Image: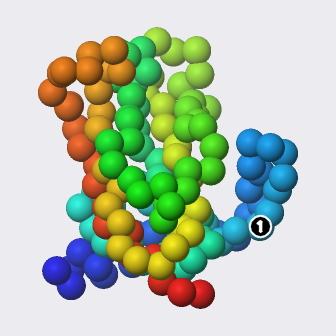
Amino acid sequence: MTRFVLFAFFSSVVFLIPIEYANGNSQKFEIIKITEQDNGTIVHVGQGTVLELSLPVMPGTGYRWEILSNKADELEQMNETQFIQDERSTNKIGTCETQVYRFVARNVGLTELKLGYRRPWETNSTLLKVFQVTVHIEEQ
């Protein structure tokens, strides 16, 4: 178990940048960035910290990441998910993009964030991939 905690600690990146809410308000937050490499780990964040999750996606196939479970009162999604195209692969068919979610850590506690990779219209289909982290929100 300690191995996962240390991995999450060393693989997460911390930034302080302004974030704009959907209503146009902006505010500076500490940001911890996690990726597919953090799957299955425990991530420690402070209250008020932004957790930014970036996962690879191939939009041309119809597959995308969807949130399967999250306690919104603990990890509040800040805005709609974003799709970021790799600058080197613009205008190329079948290229990989990055799907980005941002959450604000609101309340102290442990919460599970789980996403599934599937086609949204195939509700009964098996998930192609699952991403899950345990988020430990601590007092600042």
What residue do we see at 80% from left, 63% from top?
27
Amino acid type shown at disc 1: Lys
Q: Can you identify the residue that label 1 sits on?
A: 28
Q: How is the image coloured?
A: rainbow
CA neighbours of label 1 inside 10 A, class few (<14), some (14 to 19), many (20+): few
What residue do we see at 41% from left, 57% from top?
71
104 to 127, vertically: above or below: below
Figure quadrant of residue 81: top right
Q: Is residue 43 left or right of residue 99?
A: left
19 to 4, vertically: above or below: above
Q: Position of residue 38 (x, y in %)?
A: 33, 61
Q: Position of residue 122 (x, y in %)?
A: 26, 16
Q: Secondary structure at mark 1?
A: strand
Can residue 60 be seen by looking at this rendering?
Answer: yes
What residue do we see at 52% from left, 73% from top?
107
Q: Position of residue 110 (x, y in %)?
A: 35, 73
The front one of 60 and 29 is 29
Q: Is residue 79 left or right of residue 52?
A: right
Where's the C terminus, which quadrant?
bottom right
Tell me how many marks there are. Answer: 1
Where's the N terminus, which quadrant?
bottom left
Q: Position of residue 2 (x, y in %)?
A: 21, 84
The front one of 31 and 111 is 111
Figure quadrant of residue 22: top right
Q: Is residue 37 left or right of residue 91?
A: left
Figure quadrant of residue 112: bottom left
What residue do we see at 48% from left, 55% from top?
72
Can residue 36 be seen by looking at this rendering?
Answer: no
